[in-house]
Amino acid sequence: AGDYVEAMWLMLQQEKPDDFVIATGRKIKVKDFCEMAFAEVGLNWNDFVEIDQRYFRPAEVDQLLGDASKAKRVLGWQPRVDLAELVRMMVAHDLELAAQERTLVDAGHSRIRG
């Protein structure tokens, strides 16, 4: 996420507004992302994720792959955090939030869903 914030900041520094694709240039299946994330906490994603075919789009594009060459050329931007590290960061943050929530519940606060 920090890479994207940096890209946004670099865009704002330009003399003229322009459109940029911010992407890693790597493709990954959602299944593989789930596998990586669940593996961070020692779980098998298949035990927790259900795939409902009803939500598949009939005209889905087979492959989506962003080309950030313009961002690299004009902004000097390129991603610094690789996917594995990003997954580790995301899972660590979610675990921290879960621990905070658990602490609040243990202290007698109820969870309010809005």
Image (spheres, rainbow, N blue to C red):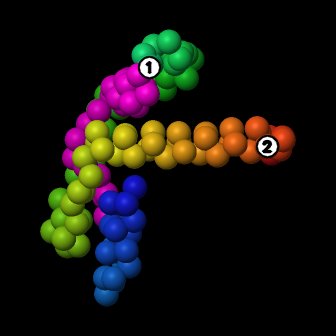
Left or right relative to 58: residue 86: left
Residue 113 shows up from this direction: no
Vertical side of 106 occupied by 73: above or below: below
Identify the disc placed on residue 22.
none
Please tell me which residue is depicted at 45% across the width and 13% down the height of the picture: 46
Where does label 1 land, which residue? 43
Residue 21, given in percent of the width and then of the height, sits at 31, 58
In magenta segment, residue 76: no
In magenta segment, residue 28: yes
Residue 36 lies in what quarter of the image? Answer: top left
Mark 1 Cα within 10 Å, few/some/many (few <14, many 20+)?
Answer: few
Residue 4 lies in what quarter of the image? Answer: bottom left
Closer to the chain start, of discs 2 and 1, is 1
For discs 2 and 1, the disc positioned in front in the rendered view: 2
Residue 45 lies in what quarter of the image? Answer: top left
Vertical side of 109 occupied by 36: above or below: above
Residue 18, given in percent of the width and then of the height, sits at 33, 73
Disc 1 marks which amino acid? Leu
Q: Secondary structure at mark 1?
A: loop
Span colored in magenta: 20-42
Where does label 2 land, which residue? 107
Vertical side of 28 occupied by 74: above or below: below
Residue 58, given in percent of the width and then of the height, sits at 47, 23
Disc 2 marks which amino acid? Ala
Please tell me which residue is depicted at 64% across the width and 46% down the height of the picture: 100
In this view, which residue lies farthest toward the bottom? Answer: 15
Q: Secondary structure at mark 2?
A: loop
Please tell me which residue is depicted at 21% across the width and 60% down the height of the picture: 78
Where is the N terminus found, in terms of image quarters?
bottom left
